[in-house]
Image (cartoon, grey):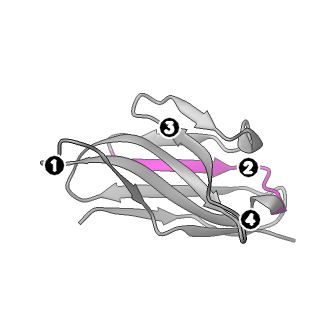
Amino acid sequence: QVQLVESGGGLVQPGGSLRLSCAASGSIFSIGAMGWYRQAPGKQRELVATIDSAGRTNYADSVKGQFPISRDNAKNTVDLQMNSLKPEDTAVYYCYADLFLIGSRFPRGYWGQGTQVTVSS
C-alpha cells in the first residue's frame, strides 16, 4: 500500500512560520517530481511549489522567496518551509508525488490526505 503522509500543519499568527513534511512509503522504486498544493475554502486547488529528483524547483509567484521546498531522496520525503505567513496562506495543504512503483513501467500521481494551515491572530 502506497501512502503519502503529511505533518506539520496548524494554527500560526501572521508573520510566523510552519514547516510541512511529507513522507512517501510503500512499494516505491523511485520518485519523480514531488510538491505541495493548497486549497482555500471556495477556491480551486493551486500549485505552491514542486521539486524534481535533481532538485530543480518551481514556485507559485505568490510564495517565491517565502516558502522554500526541499526533499530527501534517501528518505522519500519532501518539506515545505513556510515563512512570513499571511492570512491569505490559510488553506489545506496537500503533498503530491509522481511514484514509480516496483513492477510498474509508468509513474502514477499520488496525493496526501491534506493538512490544515490556519494563519490568524
Q: Residue furthest left?
A: 103
The answer to which image quadrant residue 45 occupies is bottom right
Cα separation, mark 1 vs mark 2, equals 36 Å
Mark 2, residues whose alpha carbon is within 10 Å: few (<14), some, or many (≥20)? some
Residue under pointer 2: 83
The three-letter amino acid code for the residue at tag 2 is: Asn
Residue plotted at (48% across, 63% down): 6
N-terminal of the two: label 1 or label 2?
Answer: 2
N-terminal of the two: label 1 or label 4?
Answer: 4
Residue under pointer 3: 51
Is label 2 in contact with label 3 (beta carbons under 8 Å)? Answer: no
Residue range in magenta is: 75-87
Residue plotted at (73% across, 43% down): 63
Residue under pointer 1: 102
Tag in front: 2 or 3: 3
Residue plotted at (39% across, 33% down): 53
The three-letter amino acid code for the residue at tag 3 is: Ile
- Disc number for residue 90: 4
Count every numbered label the image shows and give the total. 4
Q: Which part of the image, by quadrant, shows the N terminus?
A: bottom left
The three-letter amino acid code for the residue at tag 4 is: Thr
Is label 4 in contact with label 2 (beta carbons under 8 Å)? Answer: no
Q: Position of residue 108 (x, y in %)?
A: 32, 50
Q: Position of residue 25 (x, y in %)?
A: 29, 58
Q: Which part of the image, by quadrant, shows the C terminus?
A: bottom right
Secondary element at image label 1: loop
Is label 1 in contact with label 4 (beta carbons under 8 Å)? Answer: no
On screen, residue 36 above or below 58: below
Cα separation, mark 2 vs mark 3, equals 18 Å
Secondary element at image label 3: strand
User: Residue 82 lies in magenta, yes or no?
Assistant: yes
